[in-house]
Amino acid sequence: MATVSSAIWSRDRELNPRPHPYHGCALPTELSRHTTIDFITQGIILSTRCYNRDMATFSFDTVSEYNKAEMNNVFVLVQKEINNRYDFKGTPAEIDWMGDKIGFKVIGSNEWQIDSIIDIIRKKLASHNQSSKVLDVNKKITTSNMKVTKEIPFIAGLDQDKAKQIAKLIRESLPKVKTQIQGEAVRVTGASKDDLQAAMHLIESHDFDFPVTFNNYR
């Protein structure tokens, strides 16, 4: 217990004596976290609080988005390979955009050709470090004018179910890391950058059935 002899304790910081135990502590109005230090002034025990600044935190957002520039690059490369493939010569094999470039439209003479083009797309995505999980291949093939067509929308956005999957994974595996669902993003917060790196690795290595990326590093 620290002792301050013959001192009058004032609310005005500049008027207060600064014995060694108090040195370096801020006034209660300045900061939030605290410990309690007792002082003896003229035989009366006074209790004051020594406040410390909040520890720094780091964060990033987990989202489900695709890189539009890379998708443009993949489109051009697939188109070039289709044009150069000998087994596609004289066939309607083609790749096109869906409206507003929200996905690819694959055209061929039969289902086998459609599958071959989708395989090319996956390889080109991998060569550009893009996940093939961005492709929604669940739409049915349609047939018209002796051609078959398959639309492949890009998967984007985290709905509540997907966001909860990410939050649950982190909560169960990394208790020091906190998560908060914010619209179509999951905010991940930790006391150290190492904790966040561990969270990123955990998310990337987990086999979600949707693409995940990170942004808004703070």
Image: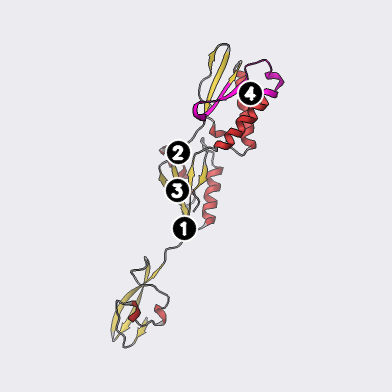
Dot 2, crowdedness within 10 Å: few (<14), some or many (≥20)?
many
Indicate the amino acid at tag 4. Answer: Ser
Image quarter hosting the N terminus: bottom left
In the displayed structure, would residue 201 be above or below residue 19? above
| Disc on res. 47 | none
| Disc on res. 187 | 3
Secondary structure found at label 4: helix
Image: magenta residue range:
82-106
Q: Residue furthest top?
A: 145
Q: At x 70% / y 19%, what residue is drawn?
A: 87
> Which numbered disc flags the more N-terminal residue, 2 or 1?
1
Indicate the amino acid at tag 2. Answer: Leu
> Which numbered disc flags the more N-terminal residue, 3 or 1?
1
In the displayed structure, would residue 40 be above or below residue 189? below
Contact between labelled residues 4 and 2, with CB atoms less than 8 Å apart: no
Can you tell which quarter of the image residue 149 is in? top right
Query: Which residue is label 1 attached to?
Result: 57
Indicate the amino acid at tag 3. Answer: Arg
Secondary structure found at label 1: loop
Q: Is residue 57 visible?
A: yes
Indicate the amino acid at tag 1. Answer: Thr
Image coordinates for residue 3, horizontal then vertical, percent:
36, 84
Q: At x 33% / y 81%, what residue is drawn?
A: 15
Q: CA distance from mark 2 to mark 4?
A: 30 Å
Contact between labelled residues 1 and 2, with CB atoms less than 8 Å apart: no
Dot 4, crowdedness within 10 Å: few (<14), some or many (≥20)?
few
> Which numbered disc flags the more N-terminal residue, 4 or 1?
1
